[in-house]
Image (cartoon, helix red, strand yellow):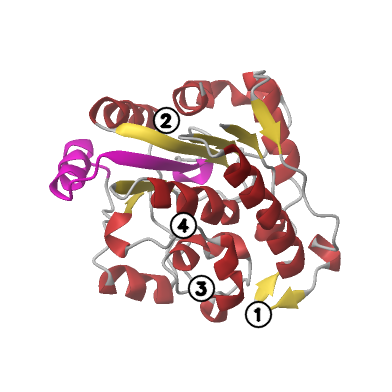
Amino acid sequence: MKIYFPQWQGSGTGTTIEPGAKTILDYLDDEEFVSVPLSELPAGNNREKRYDINNYDAITEQLHRLKETIERANPRTLKTIGGDCGLEIVPVSYLNKKYPDLGIIWFDAHADINKPCDSPSCNFHGMPLRTLLGEGEPDMTSLLSSTIQASQIHYVGLRDIDKTEQVRIEQGNIYAPRLLDVPTLVQTLKSKDIKHLYLHFDFDCLEPNDYAKTYYQVPDGITIMEAETCIAALKKEFTIVGTSVLESITTVQKELQPITPILDLLMR
């Protein structure tokens, strides 16, 4: 199943995220993508905060709609154009229930593993992994089809980590190397008997000198070539059951040119 879900509310006021997602949708030009409507509840500059989460009501309303759409279709695989990273709690938890040997590859500059009460921004796109671990806001539990274990998380491109996130990463012995080593990543996954993978791809994992049209720009990321090599190796060694492309903000299709090989690897 292919889904277009340009959620931006999880980023606080990041309205550039929705048109950025639309640019990717237009580039792919694939009629199989199903569009899931976003909430019309107040968000952004008019947002309300509940449970230490900005835009909480809008986020939960539209994520329930996303969950219902997926469950109704009952697909074996998912490809999602987004949107902010907070949307991941629905597709990842769905696929985790379907595939007990699921590994999660989190291509991201950020750890996204804060509790709401620890988040400096109170923006939900910094909380999805903690939510998926079953340690987030309890009222969001109904959005999850299952919860994951810390051992399923594997970071690529991680370099901007809050102190509370670092503590959780260390407590869970989560795979979070500073430098990308594809053979070691593959071997780590195999040592855990992981057979299926979900590839979360936030474009801020990339070095800004390679691609800077992202919601956040964090120096010293992985190169586009490194990302391509890693994705290709993972596709060769494992069964990819879920992918996402998130938080690209350009509205000019020509500016996607540097990342089109990544888009093709993940979405075609």
* Rendered-image quadrant of the N terminus: top right
Measured Cα–Cα span from mark 2 to mark 3: 32 Å
Tell which tag, 1 or 2, sits nearer the viewer. 1
Q: Is residue 194 magenta?
A: yes
Secondary structure at numbered mark 4 = loop
Label pair 2/3, CB-CB below 8 angstroms: no
Residue under the image location 61 percent in, 25 percent down? 256
Q: Is residue 183 magenta?
A: yes
Magenta stretch, residue numbers? 180-205
- Kind of residue sitting beneath label 1: Tyr
Label pair 3/4, CB-CB below 8 angstroms: no
Measured Cα–Cα span from mark 3 to mark 1: 10 Å
- Kind of residue sitting beneath label 2: Ile
Tag 1 residue: 51
Tag 3 residue: 136
Secondary structure at numbered mark 3 = loop
Tag 4 residue: 110
Tell which tag, 1 or 4, sits nearer the viewer. 1
Instruction: Identify the mark nearer the N-term, 3 or 4.
Output: 4
Instruction: Identify the mark nearer the N-term, 1 or 4.
Output: 1
Measured Cα–Cα span from mark 2 to mark 4: 17 Å
Instruction: Identify the mark nearer the N-term, 2 or 4.
Output: 4
Residue 236, located in which quarter of the rendered image?
Answer: top left
Residue under the image location 85 percent in, 63 percent down? 42
Residue under the image location 80 percent in, 61 percent down? 44
Tag 2 residue: 224
Measured Cα–Cα span from mark 3 to mark 4: 17 Å
Q: Which of the pair 141/120 is nearer the observer?
A: 141
